[in-house]
Image (cartoon, grey):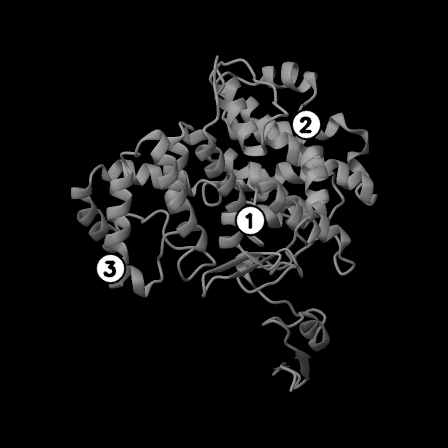
Amino acid sequence: MPETITITDDRTGKTVTVPIEGGVFPSSALRELDPSLYCYDPAYLSTASCKSDITYLDGGAGILRYGGYPIEQLAEKSTYLEVAYLLLNGELPNSEQLSGWVDDVTHHTFIHENMRKRFVDGFHFSAHPMGMFISAVAALGTFYGGSKDVEDPEARNRQILRLIAKAPTIAAMCYRFSVGLPFNLPDNNLSYPANFLNMMWKVGDYEVDPRLERAMEVLFILHADHEQNCGTTAMRIIGSSHADPYSAAAGAAAALYGPLHGGANEAVIRMLTDIGSIENVPAFVESVKAGEGRLMGFGHRVYKNYDPRAVIIKKAAYDVFEVTGKNPLLDVALALEETALSDSYFIDRKLYPNVDFYSGLIYQALNFPKEMFTVLFAIPRMSGWLAHWQEHLNDPAQRISRPRQWYSGPDKRDYVALDNR
């Protein structure tokens, strides 16, 4: 028997029955009842704005899958570029497809010299790397005449390739500028994550440790997509106007720049630094329970169980610390996690560690300054943003995005002359 929902308008007695598919019913039911009737849903807590094949997320069960593949398997066995291909094409590539895709990305990593020498030099020496990254991504579109041909699949694919390939180059460029170091050009002999680390850190003789390369690969995989978050929604909404993907990606990155979206791992580092030592953990936990502080890196808008990415990233943290030495904040983090997970206050509220709880510790151990944390998020998320942008453009049910509003201002009133106010 098919699942349905019946809605009755008590004002008129009119009733509409519509199907429920995958826990979702169409908003057309409201239009059938009354074309002027809207659902008030602040922050879209109960609204599905699109139908997507890209990422499945069950927050209650702690499940995350890209194209049906569990994130645990991808993090263990895959590479970031293979995952990017999966997000964009819906299937894992065969060996020939993967080889061609990796080769294409690898040979599009360079950026125009005018971008490197003129555009970046226009920033103040103390400019935030993420602000520079957003601006550079938007500006990149002006270098490619076909970037606005969003209805041409071949033109779209070229821009997708360029954005994924050049995101690490732009990120490293922004960092090197912010600390006054000369730029390192991409090395096409290196893997995607190794090339990024090399562009970031090479001064004189430098060789990427394969354990750090793999840890960065895993971090990129874990951050590649996460369903309809704030940045992805921005990407889709901007893209719905048929803006070029560079402008849309810059808008998505700007959403990520907000501290409530991409700044969580930085907030975790600040919290752990403020706690200072294991001895201070119990007092901090009590202050949180008393409403005097916030437990950063715990809980999630969607997950009401353990974030599956947190389990993977915790293991990656130990792999990194084998190379870099243990981050002194790790013991504080472990003590905080143990204390919180044994306290009914946090258990009852389903506050479990999320991906941000340990990612900042890894980035800090790798010598990334806190200002780069959001940039590190944006690099891998580029493939997810572009997958959603492409899917949105190909969806015949979609049009330019325009949410409705509930007007709560004054009723009609007459203009009052300035002297009479």
Query: Do the residues under discs 3 and 1 have CB atoms within 8 angstroms?
Result: no
Question: In the depicted view, which residue is nearer to us: 3 or 407?
Answer: 3
Q: How many residues crowd mark 1 within 10 Å: few (<14), some (14–19), many (20+)?
A: some
Q: In the image, residue 268 lies at what x, y percent?
A: 35, 41
Residue 307 seen from this side: yes
Give left or right: position of 238 versus 345: right
In front: 292, or 197? 197
Front residue of 198 and 229: 198
The residue at the point 74 percent across, 38 percent down is 244
Mark with earlier residue (2, 3): 2
Q: Of callouts 3 and 1, which one flags the residue occurring earlier in the amino acid sequence?
A: 1
Image quadrant containing the C terminus:
top right
Residue 237 visible somewhere in the drawing = no
Q: Which mark is residue 230?
A: 1
Task: Classify mark 3: helix, strand or loop.
Answer: loop
Examine the image and state in which quarter residue 405 appears. bottom right
Mark 1 and mark 2: Cα distance apart in space: 22 Å
Q: Are marks 1 and 2 in contact (CB under 8 Å)?
A: no
User: Mark 3 — residue?
Assistant: 342
Asked if marks 2 and 3 touch (Cβ < 8 Å), the reply is: no
Q: Amino acid at mark 1?
A: Cys
Residue 226: x, y in percent? 55, 51
x then y, percent, for residue 165: 65, 32
> For the N terminus, which image quadrant?
bottom right
Secondary structure of residue under mark 1: helix
